[in-house]
Structure formats: structure tokens, C-alpha cells
Image: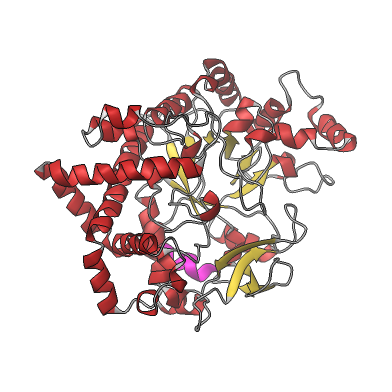
Amino acid sequence: MLFPRSSGLLLHPTCLPSPHGIGDLGQAAYDFVNFLAAADQQFWQVLPLGPTGYGNSPYMCYSAIAGNPLLISLEDLRNQGLLTDEDLNSLPEFPRHTVDFDQVVATKIPLLEKAAINFQAQADEADLEEFHQFCQHTAAWLDDFALFMALKAANDGAAWHTWAANLAQRQPAAIAQQHQQLAAEIFALKFQQFEFFRQWSRLKAFANEQGIQIIGDIPIYVAHDSADVWANPQFFELDPETSEPAFMAGVPPDYFSATGQLWGNPTYAWDAMDKDRYCWWVSRFRRLLDFVDVIRVDHFRGFEAYWQVPKGEETAENGEWIAGPGAALFEVVAQELGRLPILAEDLGDITPEVIELRDQFEFPGMKILQFAFGSDSDNSFLPFNYARNCVVYTGTHDNDTVIGWYEQLSDYEQGRISSYLGCISPDGIHWDLIRLGLSSIANQMIIPLQDLFGLDTSARMNFPGKPEGNWVWRYQAEDLNQGVGDRLRQLTHLFGRNPKPRPSQD
């Protein structure tokens, strides 16, 4: 799909300012939308919004569809009368610039459970009807997810494949019994999903009213310890005796890691998915499109061919490329859902076959300016080599910030960048790359907020291959100042990326 010339910012909601330890869907999210609109941006890109597990990665969630309850605004619950001022005033002090996930979970989840109890006791007929309609509309995934999370808590957080066999194998009598025994816990979990999507829907509607579209993110893989794999084991490559991944996903050695990246997710049983006409994927795309306007497909190259590592390996080095579903998947999705607004994350070991698959469906690819200066003039990330149907970034969530990246370069590499740009301006290398991307022919440019602020490595979102300490950066309200917004707006207009008036209907 071809997109108009435009620009936007990349910011995960956990990074928003909040007094409760983690960004949420409260007032700060609306303030950020207002900042985007005032700067004449047209996109807000977020990372996956699912409930995170070990390592707190949004790419390793307990569900491919559910929302992260930690993003629920406690102020909103208080305004509904489901929490009190005392509940919010008695919270501990949290770090201002980072997320302490353990502290947030220990503090916030009990309050969400309290809100669920209060909702059940005092909600009026209209609210209860809205809740029941949500549960009915989402039953295809919500029932499995709520039971999965309740069972996980009852098993002290253990992975599902270690549960009692009758539960791990979803034997009907055992499942029915647990539905009854864990009814209160299941209700609380369903309430959290109801409230998350109610708050998110309001935020998205507000953004759309301001001319801002939301770019969501669909990871190619799901976590092994997830409701998706537990409920649909036939679609994943699992060991038939242990239910552990028989083959694990990852990528071979690359720019980010000399031993590759071993993600640990099970790879898909694509033959089984094909026989089912990719219904699991169709449902996943359909559900996400209810809550975002554009979908960034993570690790797009894995649909053409994916790196598969046998069980037992400790690095991704000893894997092999296996043919993926290719065009067949996207043809079925298009037949079921129409032409999708998809951006293809086409980074890494990209072959002509991957490019052909991307271009067959006119999916825009990604161009990363931090990758542009390490070789000769044939480098596809240099702006003069772009096709218009692409999205340019200064960097992604997996890259260092521009400032951190630049400071680590050799004198030769810094000199090459200076020669390309003409000079490093007094505004700083981050503004130079922002200007370079905005001035390029790429239809879209997305800027990580950290680069707009000119922050160093301490603000980096993720270090690929590092299992802990990621995803913790947050900004503060005072950082989102008018001066930064005005500069971005000026450059957005200068390079023709501002919103254009709609044609008159007269």
C-alpha cells in the first residue's frame, strides 16, 4: 500500500511520564497526541501492546492479542469510582526516568484486582452490558487467555508445558473444572482486558480526531509460554513428548550479534496453518486492525524464509534457512480482510526473494540512517538509493540513539558522515539525521522520540541479545517542550510532510 508523504514519532506507551512507575493510557498519552498534532505529525508508532513476560519484552508476550494491563490508567479507574484517592495517594515512590517492572507489577496488579471487584459490585446496567458484549465479541481469544493466566498464577508462574498433564493438554473435564474453581480470577483478568481496550479505544479515537494514525506492531513469533501456543499447539513445532519447542526461531550472526540471536520462540508448523487457510493469522490481523490504523510486520523476511535452530542449541549459529509461507499467507489475508495497510520490517539478511515478496504486495520497507554510512555508495540505506515507497528512520527500538551511535564511531566513519552531510551542524548530529530523513524521497519518516530529544545511550530502548535491563526508558513531561515541537514542525513543512487540506466535497 502506498502512503502519502508524511512523518511521525516512535514511542512505546510505557515510556510516557506517569506518577505510577510506568507510562499508561492516561493524560500523558493525550498530551503526547496533542504534541504530535501541534508539530503536524501524522503517525504515532508503538511497539507491541501485549502483556509481557520474562525480560519485559513487548516481543515476548503471554498473548498475541491481549493488551498489557500495566498500561491501564489508575486515574481513569479512580474517576470511574473503581479506586479511591487513598488508593493512589498511598503508592510508593517510583523512579522518574526508568520503569522498575517488578515494583510496578507488585503495586499495580493488586489495584487492578481491587478495581475488578468494585466493578463487579457496583457497575450499572449499561457498564455491565458493555463488559458482557466485550467478552462475547472477544471470546475466541479472551477465554483461553484469561484461563491461561489464571492457571499460570495458580501454578506459581510455571510455564504451561510443566503443568499437570490434563491441563497442559487441555483435557475438557480438567478445563471445565478449572473454569469453575478460578472463576473470580478469570473475571478479574477479563475485566483488565475490557478496561485496557476501553481506554485504548478512547485514546485511538482521540488521536484519529487530531489527524494522527496509530502504527501498531505485529511480531512474527509468539512466546512459547503463551496462551496462543497452549491453546493451538498444532500450529507450532513442538516436541511431542515434552511440548517444548522442537525448533527455535532466531537470526544468524549479524550486525547486532556475532553469534546471532536465539529468540527461543517456537517456529510455526506452516503446513498445518496452510491446511487451515491461515485462520490463526487472519484472526490476528483482524483483531489488531480493530485498534491500530497501520501494521508494522516485524521480521518480514521470516515469511519468505526463516532461521530455524534445533532444540538444545545455546546460540543461533547452528541453524538453517527454511522456506516460509511466502505469498500464500498474504493472499489469504487479503482475500479475507482486503488490502492491508502494512509496513514491512525488511532488515537483516535480505535476499531478492524477500524484496520480491515485499514488492508483490506494495508493502513499504524500512530504511535506517544509522546503517547508511558503513560502506560505499551502493549502500541501500543511503537516501539517494531510496524508492519512494519506504519508511525512513534515524534508528529503531533495537538501535542505539543517534547520539550514542555517533559517539561510538571511528574518526573515519564520523568523517564520512560529515562529508556526506557537508558538515555536522551546531544543532547536533541527531537533528542532521532528522533533516536528512525528512528531506529524502521516502514517503514516510518515523523518528524515535529519544532522537528528537538528542539523548545518549542511556535512553536506548533495547540491546538485542541482552536478556535483561531493556525497555525501561521514560521521558518526563517537561521534556516535551514547545521548542522541540516547533523545530520539528518547521522541518516537517519545509520538506512537504505536513498534512494537506482535504479536497472540498462541493
Q: Quadrant of residue 426?
A: top right
Visible in this render: residue 133? yes
Q: Is residue 67 magenta?
A: no
Q: Residue furthest top?
A: 483
Q: Residue furthest right?
A: 412
| Magenta-tinted stretch | 326-333
Residue 454 locus on image (x, y percent): 66, 27
Visible in this render: residue 338? no
> At x 23% / y 37%, what residue is drawn?
82
Q: Is residue 389 left or right of residue 70?
A: right
Q: How is the image coloured?
A: secondary structure
Q: Is residue 78 above or below residue 135?
A: above
Q: How many marks?
A: 0
> At x 50% / y 83%, what residue is drawn?
240
Residue 442 locus on image (x, y percent): 62, 40
Residue nearer the viewer, 41 or 252: 252
Q: Is residue 238 left or right of residue 378?
A: left
